[in-house]
Amino acid sequence: MSVSYRQPGVVLTDRRFTVPLDHAAPDGETIEVYAREVVASDKAGQDLPWLVYLQGGPGFGAHRFVGRQAWLDRALTEFRVLLLDQRGTGASTPATRQTLPLRGGPAAQADYLTHFRADSIVRDCELIRRELTGGAPWTVLGQSFGGFCTLTYLSLAPEGLATALITGGLPALDAHADDVYRAAYPRMERKTAAHYARYPQDVARARRVAEHLLRHEVTLPGGYRLTAEAFQSLGILLGGGDGSHRLHFLLEDAFVLTPDGPALSDAFQEQLQALLSYAANPLYALVHESIYGQDARPTAWSAERVRAEFPQFDAAKALAGDGPLPLTGETVHPWMFDSDPALRPLRETADLLAARTDWTPLYDPARLAANEVPVAAAVYHDDLYVDTAHSLRTARAVRGLRTWVTDEFEHDGVRAGGPRVLDRLLALARDEV
């Protein structure tokens, strides 16, 4: 049963759908998928076209907007919006250390999680679309990993799409995870250098924290084992529009003087726990590299292996000199499953997923080359999370795709730019600019 309620300027309806766990076995086991319908209060009774939003991640539920925030305000002028919690996230049969043991041991859990990639998400969308629209195609807005899903949608079921809009989410169609991370580490270096150029005082501050962690064992209030490598991973903040500033403020008050000498402050540790823990979205860590699996090659902890090709990221080696500490971001490593209490019970499951050799293709290059759906994509000039060169190569491989390449925003441009970003993409897709 759907339940409707109001927030300022909008009417919200909670919707739940039953879908097959494995779309290749439609009569088999089912799971529940949750989505929130949003419509402008003054249009609630109108017959509006639908826009479905696919959140970035993988592993994140749809953003919980209040009223008409960000891009949603523009969307509600002409659409009825569906904010989808992709399977395994949010309220859609969540996959966590608490729920996955219901599947059995690590092998059963790993088998289960193979059904949580973009192809299954697209098949869920198609079942939901037919139920909500009566078969009419809808518009999809895919942010980051949601854009990856949109390319899969155009490959598997383009008949379901009236328009496809992508923000910061054009993946390489044929790259192995190793290719993705070989392109990523140099970007991390550039983003780190840009941060230190903006805040030169942070060079000494970051070095001091890392030196402390190399000499001391630190466990954060929530049980997270803080290491120099974990501290370096805060570079993930640098992919957001305000991320450099957030990192600077975080480092300002890292230490306090105690009777035993300088120590990491409680306030600093509490913030680190919130930033580093995957308790809210463990699926991100579990399936992150599998989103690049498309052939018989295992991902095999790609980010960790490729990092060894960039020795400048070794914290101890960096601190042996007098240069800045390099930061990392958007990478998942085996040690995270030892450090994070939310991931520790899932380490063997993660190892099994990393070793799999039966991944199936997520994109159909021939179908994309013959695409007839209007597609527009925002490509951010030096995106930390998605390689710009990969994105532009993919854009050229999709017939009719129009790009807006900009350095005005970082990866979270659809949030930071709000209505203006969505308006630009709609105009591009409709050939109005």
Image (cartoon, rainbow, N blue to C red):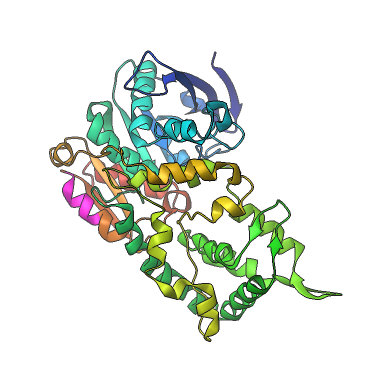
Most extreme residue toward the bottom is 322
Q: Is residue 312 above or below residue 38?
A: below
Name the residue at 32% across, 42% down.
357
284 and 306: which one is in front? 306
Q: Is residue 428 visible?
A: yes
Q: Position of residue 376 (x, y in %)?
A: 27, 45
Q: Is 299 displayed left or right of 16 in the figure?
A: left
- Residue 76 seen in render: no
- Quadrant placement of the N terminus: top right
Q: Is residue 234 magenta?
A: no
Q: Is residue 394 magenta?
A: yes
Q: Nearer the viewer, residue 283 or 104?
A: 104
Residue 334 screen position, x and y as percent? 50, 54
Q: Main secondary structure of the magenta part?
A: helix
Residue 377 vs residue 260: left or right?
left
Q: Residue at x 29, y 34 (%)?
A: 153
Q: Which residues are magenta?
A: 392-398
Q: Is residue 324 shown above or below 142?
A: below
Front one among 103 and 245: 103
Q: Quadrant of residue 160?
A: top left
Q: Residue at x 59, y 53 (%)?
A: 338
- Where is 429 relative to 323, above or below? above
Position of residue 125 in the picture relative to residue 198 (left or right): left
Horizontal side of residue 62 vs 392, given as left or right = right
